Amino acid sequence: MTPAATARTALDLTAGLPLSALEDLYRDLHRHPELSGREHRTAGVLAGQLRTAGYETAEGVGGTGVVGVLRNGDGPTVLLRGDMDALPVTEETGLPYASEAPGVMHACGHDLHVTWLAGAAGALAAGRDTWSGTLLVVGQPAEETGRGAAAMMEDGLYERFPRPDVLLAQHAAPGPAGLYAHTPGLIMSASTDVDIVVHGVGGHGSRPEATVDPVVTAAYIVTRLQSVVSREVAAREQAVLTVGRIEAGTRHNIIPSEAHIALNLRTQSAEVRERMLAAIRRIAAGECAAAGCPREPTVTVGGSFPMTVNDADTDRRVAAVHGEVFGAGTVLDFGAVMGSEDFPFLAGDGLPYAYWFVTSTPAEVWDAAAATAGDDLMEQLAAVPSNHSPHFAPDLATVGPGVRTLVSAALEMFTP
């Protein structure tokens, strides 16, 4: 079957989407966000949607994960994945369906992902006479912590359920609604958290000479870390180092005995990651030695996300179908971005996958940004609310297209 024929089938299957019900589902999920590992209500809602559509459905996989299986004769096994967790962000969108959970918000679009997943699962079940194989629908918890996909794998995902031949996933992103960003190969960066504890000698603020101030030393470390990317990473490489937290002390007049620094690395190669980690350890140890700290700093490498690297052939096939579904000029290649995902953990020992972005900024928001930022795309993107912003609010007009992207991609993977 050609991409054009697959697209026609996908359009037929999604012509009668229950858009009103799907939009209501999205609003409900947005009102009731749940943090990573606590997605009990969200999981229950998704599981109910899958059972209604005729899937064999299991809950509690890897904590709060949901798995739906639809067996439909001989053919490949295709996995569709949507993540479910929200963020500890206080919503400021002013939407009539804004979060009702204090301090928690779907600021990354995972409520939209679950809606797309439920819609695609329903459409593919209703149109099962157009494809043959096994469909595996995965509602994944705890993507934001980087632990959810691995937890599902550790819970025997592919021992308890069919092992997929290919995996598909997508993510809402800022940009004028109606574009689909594909990159064959590296599309998202690795992420690594690092914690540093500076050990000083505490004392009274009036007698600093009797102490070793870890706050001053931590400040030197933070300042020196800014040179890692600019002076130790080649210009041809992409890397980001962010100090997200620095903590020390309890009172104005007490010099504490410890200071804590939390930082994050974004890298696009294992070599650069190791070089940056070595630089962090060297800088922290050097500044602590210069300050006369009683012992070396404690440097702990914490949670990490892998690089997301699309199987080139799989991604090109999906991109071609999306181009047929949505028309010329709708599919583009942004190249690799510095964001990170734990989706590759579901690929295990090398299963092929395609991961893409669906732009979701409402037209009126994008037009206002374009009016002030000019013609430069990066300036326009910087002027609209992005993922993790308290103002992030995807356009409801993307509900139907986001279902069609998953349906058409799955149909293409079922095609011999």
Image (cartoon, rainbow, N blue to C red):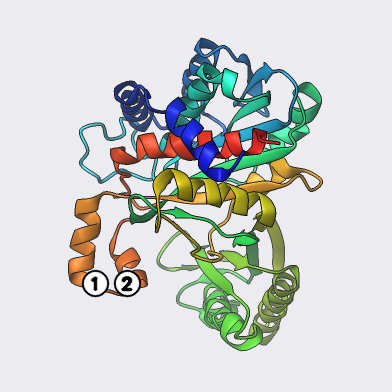
Q: Earlier in the sequence, mark 1 or mark 2?
A: 1
Whether residue 34 is visible here, answered yes or no, is: no
Q: Residue at x 67, y 18 (%)?
A: 72
Image position of 363 (left or right of 231): left
Circle 1 SS class: helix
Which of the 4 quarters of the picture holds residue 97?
top left
Q: Nearer the viewer, residue 34 or 178?
A: 178
Dot 2 surroundings within 10 Å: few (below 14), some, or many (20 or more)?
some
The image shows residue 349 at horizontal and vertical percentages of: 81, 46
Q: Nearer the viewer, residue 261 or 37?
A: 37
The image shows residue 406 at horizontal and vertical percentages of: 52, 37
Label 1–label 2 contact, CB within 8 A = yes
Circle 2 SS class: helix
User: Looking at the picture, which amino acid does disc 1 mark?
Assistant: Ala
The C terminus: image quadrant: top right
Mark number displayed over residue 373: 1
Q: Residue at x 74, y 27 (%)?
A: 75
Q: Nearer the viewer, residue 52 or 102?
A: 52
The N terminus: image quadrant: top right
Q: Residue at x 57, y 85 (%)?
A: 230
Which of the 4 quarters of the picture holds residue 58?
top right
The image shows residue 240 at horizontal and vertical percentages of: 55, 72
Residue occupied by mark 2:
379
